[in-house]
Image: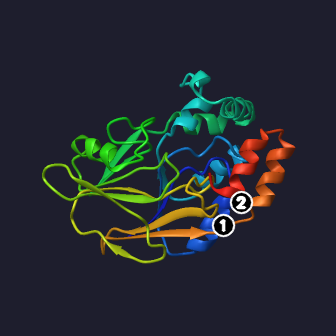
Amino acid sequence: MRILIISDIHANLTAFETVLKDANSQWEYVWCLGDVVGYGPDPNECVELLRSLPHLCLAGNHDWAALGRLDIRTFNPDARKAVNWTRETLTKDNIDYLDALPTTFVIGNYTLAHGSPREPVWEYILEPLIAALNFPHFETPYCLVGHTHQPVIYELISDEGDTEAISPAYRQQRQLNGRRQIINPGSVGQPRDANPDAAYAILDVETNTWEHRRVAYDVSAVQKRMRDAGMPERLVTRLEHGW
């Protein structure tokens, strides 16, 4: 079975639709690693599109923020404004959907989390040391995470906990080699690796292969909807720069 791996859609319908078009019919099921909403102008549309697909989805910190489960005083002012707008915009059905999402999921050889296996909603795995500290917190060979908006593979290379960060080679299948790995597909709707293109991945669980992918989308169309909604200009601008 081929799985479409997505994360951090962040209410960006244009990016989400572009990813689905780019992936075409090359997948049979979707694993979404959280943050369906937040920052972007299309929270209801993104939730409803995801709900129309065969999928499983986890809760992310912005999903929880939209539900009032997090103290958003820890968010920066622009993010707080976006959270409040999202809360006011979401329909009851879509709030109920987000409210029912789990924070972790284990399926076959894969543990899924939004942030990290030891702190599923909030922790950022941004470097090999943090990845190394997380390997004891899951039992499967592989863990898939989002949250950082940066595609990467962290591979455990020794019994002493040494961990290597491996940059993605886009549209090249990578054979998962049995070593324990923490893998991030990157962000669909708000990349933060100085590349504005939407990021996603294809996982073939039968051949045990992983493929990072990027695809350009109409950033200006999303920016117009954000400005029309009165969102902070910094959130609008960052989409075109990938930060």
Q: Residue at x 27, y 41 (%)?
A: 133
**Which sits in the foreground, 176 or 164?**
164
* Residue 181 coordinates in the image, percent (x, y): 29, 57
Task: Tell me the residue that label 1 is attached to.
Answer: 18
Classify residue 54 as left or right of residue 19.
left
Contact between marks 2 and 1 (CB within 8 A): the answer is yes
**Which sits in the foreground, 69 or 232?**
232
Numbered mark located on residue 214 in the image: none
Q: Residue at x 31, y 72 (%)?
A: 206
The quarter of the rendered structure image containing the N terminus is: bottom left
Give the residue type at disc 2. Answer: Thr
Q: Secondary structure at mark 2?
A: helix
Give the residue type at disc 1. Answer: Thr
Task: Tell me the residue that label 2 is attached to.
Answer: 14
* Residue 32 coordinates in the image, percent (x, y): 49, 52
Q: Secondary structure at mark 1?
A: helix
Classify residue 62 as left or right of residue 137.
right
The answer to whether residue 40 is above or below residue 66 is: below
The colour scheme is rainbow
**Which sits in the foreground, 101 or 178?**
178
Residue 51 in sight in this render: yes
**CA–CA distance in space, label 2 to label 1:** 6 Å
Q: Residue at x 48, y 73 (%)?
A: 170
The answer to whether residue 112 is above or below residue 70 is: below
Residue 155 sits in quarter: bottom left
Residue 41 in sight in this render: no
**Which sits in the foreground, 215 or 96?**
215
The answer to whether residue 5 is above or below residue 84 is: below
Name the outermost residue toward the left.
159
* Residue 82 coordinates in the image, percent (x, y): 71, 35
* Residue 142 coordinates in the image, percent (x, y): 29, 56
Name the outermost residue toward the bottom.
172
